[in-house]
Image (spheres, rainbow, N blue to C red):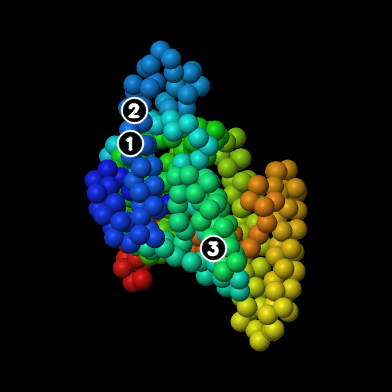
Amino acid sequence: MIPMFGRKLVRAIVVAGLAVSLSACYYLQAARGQLEIMHKREPIDEVINASDTPAELSKRLQLVKEARLFSIDELGLPDNDSYRLYADIEREYVVWNVFAAPEFSLQAKSWCFPVAGCVNYRGYFSKDAAHRKAEQLRGDYDVAVGGVAAYSTLGKFSDPVLNTMMNWEDADLVAVMFHELAHQVLYVKGDSGFNESFATAVEEFALERWLGSRNQTSELTRYQETQEVRERLMKHVQRARLDLEAIYSSSLRTDEMRLKKKDRIDQLTTDLNNEFEQSGRESPRWLSEGLNNARLASLSLYHGRLPEFRTLLAACDDDLECFYERARALAEKL
């Protein structure tokens, strides 16, 4: 998920932003958004014990506490104050990411930031601001906007559990927490695909171990079934990417290339909708909004190198310490 900024960086962010007037508003909104979250953080224990806390929220936060302890004792994830706080920011998503890619390329546009380095998206704490940026890019690029319910500050600050995460099933809530903590173990500046695939590999292995430790057989089965659906979806996406790359590298005229692109993306849309229907799941909103190069680039971030990391984990006999060391060694070669 997208790394953003925190209190100690506010002055540096503002100064850097003001130095380049076109970027000033972006950095200012990032600083304000991060400060809002930090201001609203409360210790999870205090929220659980407060008399006005809804019973369901207390129950979910107790689950977070247990999973957080598990992440340290069993997964070797960082022992710090991240996800030991809670913040209600009173909106559906914490940030909205803007993705962009050229009309005839699957290479996502990148933006560079002080903390995260160069990443293949641009995050906004305001939905309207994200869509305004998308409109500025539209015409020169295919664009896509997606809401994000959680992100990591890479261990620089104490990331809280957010109300935006509370609408998920228990397994999804715990999985995302493991995913975000994995970014604190290893993060390569300028390589979003590496970072997200690594964190996804940690997430799926960690969640299976977590559910197994609690003898939650039905939840584990449901999670594994969901993973199988995702695998089938990503196979369709990968086949479409290969076809599109061949189209984009061809000598076709622009109008012919545009037509073939539309036909292949329409076919992918049909294939994905069919997979959701056959699995008994509702097609997501991003699919109904339409696929394009930017959306395909965003989908590939989380799974593009996932098979490689799964193989690496298997080579370590599912020993996470070994896996982390080998992943770091792989990152040093980039």
> Where in the figure is residue 108, as x and y percent of width and height?
51, 66
Quadrant location of the C terminus? bottom left
Specify the label residue 42 is tagged with.
2
**Mark 2 nearby-residue class (10 Å; few <14, some 14–19, many ≥20):** some
Up the image or down, 297 lies above or below 79; here it is below
Q: Secondary structure at mark 2?
A: strand
The residue most toward the bottom is 251
Q: Secondary structure at mark 3?
A: helix
At 70% from the left and 43% from the top, the residue drawn is 281
Res. 97 in view: yes
At 45% from the left and 49% from the top, the residue drawn is 124
Q: Say which label, 3 or 2, has the lower sequence index.
A: 2
Disc 1 residue type?
Met
- Choose between 118 and 70: the one closer to the eye: 118
**Mark 1 nearby-residue class (10 Å; few <14, some 14–19, many ≥20):** some
Q: State the residue position of label 3.
A: 137
Q: Say which label, 1 or 3, has the lower sequence index.
A: 1
Q: State the residue position of label 1.
A: 38
Q: CA distance from mark 1 to mark 3?
A: 31 Å
Q: Quadrant of residue 266?
A: bottom right
Q: Quadrant of residue 263?
A: bottom right
